[in-house]
Image (tube, rainbow, N blue to C red):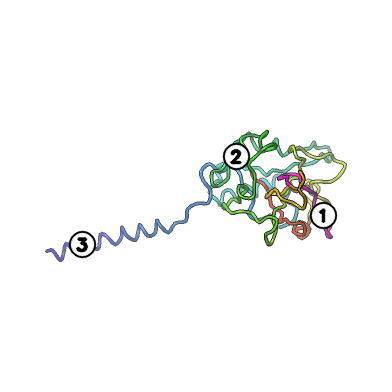
């Protein structure tokens, strides 16, 4: 009888042990429950042709969904310029009211005013949807250029000069305003340190191709904010 009891106890213990191992092997989601901001880990891959604002928003939503934060409504931080009878759209007006925090739970800005003022965006806080640090100046490759099409205050540029690669539909001719996710540039000035309005894209393909974006230290990355 003691031997039978010992066998039964071992049989009962095995499934519990297996269950524990299986549960322990499950990876923890990169996103915390309150994540409401990230930099895309990769670009769409077609230069600055994002399929317009709708395509960019969908990309943010898709990455958030894969990272476990798809219950929120995500918006790409992008402005568009007035064209074809349509008014300009300001990036600052389409991302909600805040506060926004990264996947580690660190608040990067409490509201729209702080986001465009003394915010907490740095290389260490502007994390991807996976919780990773984005390569910046001094890293190989440098990927700190983020597409925004925006002025420092988050508003759109006037229509006289393209700063949105034809409202995010061109992967050839045009130019897009870029921000530095690590807040570091070639000079010690406000533009070099700007997260959303550092310099326009340029390059031999016309300024909007994937190769053009990479040539100045980018990869077609976007800022994504939860609007709700």
Name the mark on residue 100.
2
Contact, mark 2 vs mark 3 (Cβ under 8 Å)? no
Residue 123, above or below 157: below
User: Which mark sits nearer the N-terminus, 1 or 3?
Assistant: 3
- Residue at (37, 60) in percent of width and height: 21
Residue nearest the observer in this picture, 113 or 176: 113
Is the N terminus in the top left, top right, bottom left or bottom right quadrant?
Answer: bottom left
Which mark is first along the chain, 2 or 1?
Answer: 2
Residue on which the image places disc 1: 202
Q: Is residue 62 visible?
A: no
Name the outermost residue toward the front: 188
Which of 139/70 is in front? 139
Numbered disc in front, either 2 or 3: 2
State the residue position of label 3. 8
Question: Start and end of the magenta stretch?
Answer: 193-207
Q: Is residue 109 magenta?
A: no
Figure quadrant of residue 154:
top right
Q: Is residue 2 visible in this depiction of the protein?
A: yes
Magenta highlight: main SS:
loop
């Amino acid at each position: 009888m003691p031997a039978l009891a010992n066998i039964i106890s071992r049989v009962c213990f095995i499934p519990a042990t297996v269950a524990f191992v299986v549960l322990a092997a499950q990876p923890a989601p990169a996103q915390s429950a309150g994540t409401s901001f990230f930099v895309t880990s990769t670009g769409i891959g077609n230069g600055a042709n994002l399929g317009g604002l709708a395509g960019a928003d969908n990309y943010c939503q898709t990455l958030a969904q894969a990272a476990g934060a798809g219950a929120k409504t995500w918006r790409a931080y992008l402005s568009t310029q007035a064209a074809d009878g349509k008014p300009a759209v300001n990036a600052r007006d389409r991302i909600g009211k805040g506060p926004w925090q990264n996947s580690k739970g660190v608040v990067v800005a409490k509201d729209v005013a702080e986001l465009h003022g003394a915010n907490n965006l740095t290389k260490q806080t502007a994390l991807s949807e996976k919780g990773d640090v984005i390569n910046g100046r001094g890293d190989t490759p440098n990927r700190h250029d983020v597409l925004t099409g925006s002025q420092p205050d988050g508003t759109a540029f006037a229509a006289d000069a393209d700063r949105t690669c034809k409202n995010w539909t061109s992967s050839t001719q045009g130019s897009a305003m870029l921000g530095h996710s690590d807040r570091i540039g070639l000079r010690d000035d406000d533009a070099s340190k700007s997260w959303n309005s550092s310099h326009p894209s340029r390059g031999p393909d016309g300024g909007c191709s994937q190769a053009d974006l990479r040539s100045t230290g980018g990869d077609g990355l976007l800022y994504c904010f939860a609007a709700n």
